[in-house]
Image: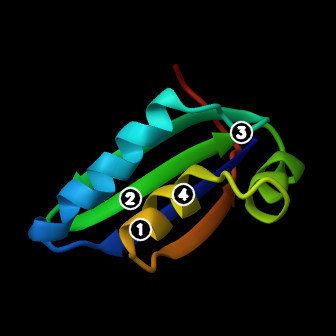
Amino acid sequence: MIMSVAHAPVEESEQANVFGAWSELVVGERPTGLVDCYLLETDGVVQIAAVWNTIEDHDRAVHHESNHPAYTVFEASGVDPTHSMFTVVGHLR
């Protein structure tokens, strides 16, 4: 599994735009291979963490389908986030 994390500082006055874009994403169609996705906020920084079955699923959502949750939410809000990717080496439920 792969986890991608996008984060950006978002002014309090702009957070409603980000959260509104997230709301639209929640009711929409999920990208192929998306396992789980979280919208996180602390001290003015918004993060979207997404877990994918494979790197191919992630890359397809970014490059071919243009429906990666982080890109969708941040771009709709006019925010330019920083992205990081991680290989999941452990998982606890």
Query: Mark 1 or mark 2: which comes first in sequence?
Result: 1
Instruction: From the viewer's side, name the closer residue of 23 and 54.
Output: 23
In the picture as drawn, the residue positioned furthest to the top comes out as: 93
Callout 3 secondary element: loop
Q: Which residue is mark 2?
A: 47
Residue placed most toward the observer, 11 or 86:
11
Marked residue nearer the N-terminal end (4 or 1):
1
**The disc label shown at residue 7, or none:** 1
Q: CA distance from mark 2 to mark 3?
A: 18 Å
- Nearer the N terminus, badge 4 or badge 2? 2
Q: Are marks 1 and 2 in contact (CB under 8 Å)?
A: yes
Which type of secondary structure does the marked residue at label 1 adopt? strand
Up/down of 40 relative to 83, above or below: above
Q: What residue type is disc 2 on?
A: Gln
Q: CA distance from mark 1 to mark 3?
A: 20 Å
In the rendered structure, the answer to whether residue 28 lies left or right of residue 66 reads left
Q: In the rendering, at what x and y percent does residue 90 appear?
A: 65, 37
Name the residue: 36% across, 38% down.
23
Quarter of the view holding residue 29: top right
Q: What kind of element bears circle 4?
A: helix
- Sequence-earlier tag: 1 or 3: 1
* Labels 2 and 3: the sequence-earlier one: 3
| Residue bearing mark 3 | 31
Q: Earlier in the sequence, mark 4 or mark 3?
A: 3
